[in-house]
Amino acid sequence: MVHNLNFKHLYYFWVIAREGSIIAASRELHLAPQTLSGQLASLEESLGGLLFKREGKQLILTHLGRTLLPYADDMFRVAEELKRVAALVTTQQSIRLAVGIASSIHKLYAYRMIEPALKLDREVTLSSRSGSIDFLVQELDHHRLDMVLTDRLPTLQRDNPLHWYELERSSITLFAAPGLSARLIANFPLSLDSTPFLVSTLESPYVHELMQWFERQGVRPKVRAEVDDSALMKVLGAHELGVFAAPTAVADEVCRQYHVVPIGKVDSISERIYAVTRARSAVNPAVEAICRRSLA
């Protein structure tokens, strides 16, 4: 049985595992390698087993080490976040905001969601990354992101302290370059039959609903291109390669930026944008500013 676990020794173990060797960890911790080896041995003795084994010049985690590492990883990442939170409360340093954006979200829409955080009185240092919702939620859970913007809710486990907020919902508008739009507006949506259409290959819920809507209208657009980049889809549309869809909420910006024309709106289909956060993230003023616009 383990008594009085020394958290400083556990931290040393975490750094050694992260750096891959005692020499590298000793440089990171500003300790002599001999001192660090002694502290690691003390931890192993208290735990009743080895945390590493040597294979040549490499340190390899044992079964005990692999078991402990995820717990230590969570503990010290939370500790780093705690230091950041304390600094935010007691100083006026810039606010760090790391946002994950689901690849299927139109980037103009993503900016619309983030904008309240960028208008705070304090400076906000923004970093963002795109990817699948499952990957981004995993990054959020491991404290590498402060929040995730998504157009579909992930599966939230009961033991996972994640929260979600519906930030906005918007109908869908179809756009085309001026050269195509003139003949499409008058008899919309029947005018879309056999018309070149640009399809997103990303898992955005409204895309599937839109294709079903076309079918109910007796319309069969001709798929001209399948793309996984919302910005590229707009560029292709601007060059008269086909019609594309985007949220009505950003219609004016889409028209201004890509010089296209709205040809019709589909009110029965909505894109919803959600913010997914950890429970503790509410203390981040930038996250709070974004979630404050929740529809709930």
Image (tube, rainbow, N blue to C red):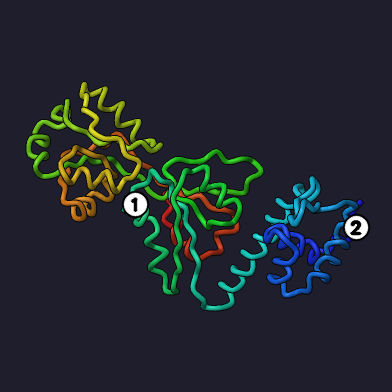
At numbered mark 1, what does the secondary structure look like: helix, strand or loop?
Answer: helix
Up/down of 160 relative to 32, above or below: above
Q: Write the residue at 37% across / 53% down.
A: 110
Q: Write the residue at 78% across / 74% down.
A: 32
Up/down of 58 relative to 150, above or below: below
Callout 1 amino acid: Lys
Residue under circle 2? 45
Nearest to the observer: residue 290 or residue 130: 130
Within-10-Å neighbours for mark 1: few <14, some 14–19, many 20+: some
Q: Write the residue at 79% across / 45% down.
A: 63
Indicate left or right for 281 with 179 as reference.
right
Q: Write the residue at 56% across / 64% down.
A: 283
Up/down of 46 relative to 260, above or below: below
Up/down of 47 relative to 216, above or below: below
Please tell me which of labels 1 and 2 falls first in the chain: 2
CB under 8 Å between discs 1 and 2: no
**Image location of residue 120, percent across then percent down:** 41, 70
**Image location of residue 67, percent across then percent down:** 76, 47
Any part of residue 296 in sight: no
Residue under circle 1? 107
**Image location of residue 29, percent across then percent down:** 72, 71
Any part of residue 143 in sight: yes
Within-10-Å neighbours for mark 2: few <14, some 14–19, many 20+: few
**Image location of residue 18, percent across then percent down:** 68, 59
Indicate left or right for 120 with 21 as reference.
left
Nearest to the observer: residue 247 or residue 126: 126
Nearest to the observer: residue 237 or residue 212: 237
